[in-house]
Amino acid sequence: MTDLDIIEQIETELNINFTPQSDKVDSINNEYFINKSGQIERLSIFAVGLKQIGLLHSKLKALENLIELGLIGLDITDVSWLSDFENLTSLDLW
């Protein structure tokens, strides 16, 4: 399964659409950046219900090259599940 397949699954499950970006992602939109190897490096999910995000743990974890993650507009109180994301260098939660 490719990273784009995972993005499509997330879109379907959350009933949202991601916009691909050529450089940086804007943390107030549903966007992703894909590198030349076809791997998602940056992902921003905006205003999706908290319960849905918890269900996405395995899908987000499958994005092995994810270095930037934005979960914006969510009322997240437990971020312990994010400890599995060893490659993250940037995390936006607001």
Image (cartoon, rainbow, N blue to C red):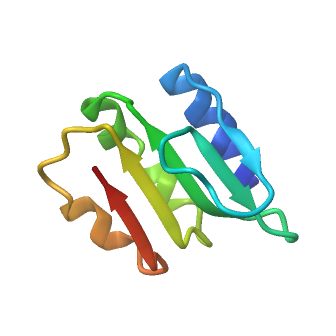
Q: Residue at x 71, y 38 (%)?
A: 19
Residue placed furthest toward the left? 77
Q: Position of residue 94 (x, y in %)?
A: 28, 49
Q: Position of residue 4 (x, y in %)?
A: 75, 47
Q: Residue at x 28, y 72 (%)?
A: 83
Q: Is residue 81 above or below residue 55?
A: below
Q: Is residue 76 above or below residue 13?
A: below
How many numbered discs, if any? 0
Left or right of 43 in this view: 74: left
In the image shown, does 26 or 57 lie closer to the viewer?
Answer: 26
Q: Residue at x 47, y 60 (%)?
A: 69
Q: Residue at x 12, y 49 (%)?
A: 77
Q: Position of residue 25 (x, y in %)?
A: 62, 55
Residue placed furthest toward the right? 36
Q: Position of residue 39 (x, y in %)?
A: 74, 64
In the image shown, does 73 or 77 lie closer to the viewer?
Answer: 73
Give the quadrant of residue 74.
top left
Give the quadrant of residue 30.
top right
Left or right of 67 in this view: 90: left
Left or right of 83 in this view: 87: right
Give the quadrant of residue 12.
top right
Q: Is residue 13 above or below residue 55?
A: above
